[in-house]
Amino acid sequence: MRKLITNRNLIIVNFGIVSYFILIWLIKIYKIDSVLIGVFREMLTIPFLLAQIVFLVIGIKYLIKNKRNLITTFSVLALAICTVITIGSFF
């Protein structure tokens, strides 16, 4: 498990999750209404929400235990901001 969580993998996953939610936000802003996009949005939103929380915890633990890298810190910070905005949109 330790070998799977590297700087590179954590950065890719964090920015992937943030990019997904930015894409969802842009689709809403520009009112793009397609059946195929709606299907993928419905199928992927809950797994990405759960992954957001899981990788935020993993990222924080990784930053505490390992040497801090600027890009890794930025990706975890971006994920934390995205998580707050996403979960805050429910209330």
Image: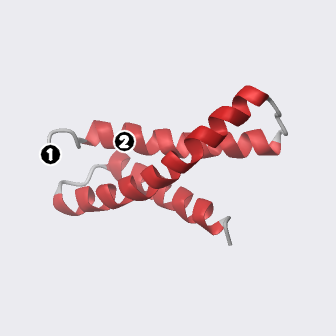
**Looking at numbered disc 2 in the image, what kind of residue is underneath it?**
Ile
Q: What is the x, y in percent for residue 88?
A: 63, 68
Q: What is the x, y in percent for residue 29?
A: 81, 45
Q: Is residue 1 left or right of residue 48?
A: left
Residue 27: quadrant of the picture: top right
Q: Is residue 7 left or right of residue 48?
A: left
Dot 1 corresponds to which residue?
Answer: 2
Dot 2 corresponds to which residue?
Answer: 11
Name the image colouring.
Answer: secondary structure
Q: Nearer the viewer, residue 8 or 3?
A: 3
Q: Residue at x 55, y 65 (%)?
A: 84
Above-or-below relation of 73 to 40:
below
Q: What is the x, y in percent for residue 9?
A: 30, 37
The outermost residue toward the bottom is 91
Report the mark closest to the observer, 1 or 2.
1
Q: Is residue 56 left or right of residue 49?
A: left
